[in-house]
Image (tube, grey):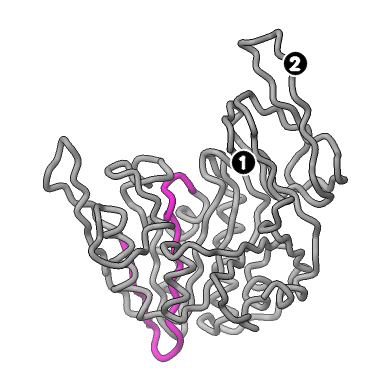
Amino acid sequence: MATVSREDFSCAAATNQSAYRRVTIPMLRIEAGPGPAVALMAGVHGDEWEGQAAILELWRLLPGILRRGTVYLLPAANAEASLAGTRLSPSDGGNLNRAFLGSPARGYTESVAAALEARLLPRIQALVDVHSGGASLRYLPSSVITRYGNDAYDERLPALARAFGLPDCVFFRGTESGSMPAAASRHGVLRLSAEIGGGRETSQALVDRCRDGLLGCLGELGLLPDRPSARRPEVRLYDLDAPAATVRASEAGVFVPAVELGQVINARQRIGQLMEPARPDTAPRALTSPQAGTVVCLRAIARSDDGDCLIQVAPALPLDSLASKY
């Protein structure tokens, strides 16, 4: 029988209207004896709903099925942003995925990061951190592997990505010391992430895929009862760190995409246009893809500005090529 306890913590989140306001971050600890400690986290950005909903389902499900080890569940790591439905923290405009900067913490967002780094990361061996495209983007449902700095290749990563059960996996390189990957790296924590959905919406189908992916990771880490081996899909790897993978707007306009998520396109293929309805004498500008590949990410908000990410495209590689990225 698993032991369940609440380990919520609160952080100061002062505003001009509330000098001594605090926000509580919910955290559940489920312990089922010897074994690894794993954290399942979502809501680092408050407008990314798939992981938040999936972990909330596990909040009720997991105590009855966990067989060994310890699991920490954080469905809304940035509770203030989750309650507001925003990417950034409303009280200070902070991005929790860039706030792991050590002490002294300046404001609510850095206080949450400092608490996670002090209370959670030293106690776990693995972390699955679920994201989505949020309000501005939609992603092809994918597991995510982020290499921070010069971290060595971890041979456990491909198996964990396969266990998540999605046929697509994206790869990023991280260099910012305040990111969650950087914090996990400092503590030697094995980390997998995910990008599932977006567009300030969700669906039960996406939540189910996320929940099942998280359970798959716990099974791979040995925390769940042995089950008949499920057939896992072949996983395609997309390197989104390559400069040609991302097309950004170079001027303001309305983005009208001509391709869809998951579509395979050619280099120099037309991917959409930027138009300005309020200036009908300005000709729309056609946009083309710098490289061939699969459409992994699309902007969900039509009105765009200079610098906004419009689309990400990358060729599919075998997951076994991951080691060559290190």
Between 227 and 109, which is closer to the camera in this rendering?
109
Relative horizontal placement of residue 196, taking residue 167 as reference (left or right): left
Residue that extends furthest to the left in the rendered view of this protein: 20
Q: Which residue is mark 1?
A: 309
Neighbour class for label 1 at 10 Å: few (<14), some, many (≥20)?
some
> Which mark, by number, is residue 95?
none
Above or below: residue 217 compared with residue 53: below
| Residue 79, percent from left and from top | 33, 52
Instruction: Tell which tag, 2 or 1, sits nearer the viewer.
Output: 2
| Residue 312, percent from left and from top | 70, 47
Between 29 and 194, which is closer to the camera in this rendering?
194
Determine which quarter of the picture holds residue 11.
bottom left
Magenta region includes residue 195 = no
Relative horizontal placement of residue 278, taking residue 59 as reference (left or right): right
| Residue 153, percent from left and from top | 63, 80
Q: Residue at x 67, y 46 (%)?
A: 297
- Which three-letter amino acid code belongs to the residue tagged 1? Cys
Q: Quarter holding the C terminus? A: bottom right
- Which three-letter amino acid code belongs to the residue tagged 2? Ala
Q: Residue at x 40, y 64 (%)?
A: 59
Residue range corresponding to the magenta coloring: 26-48
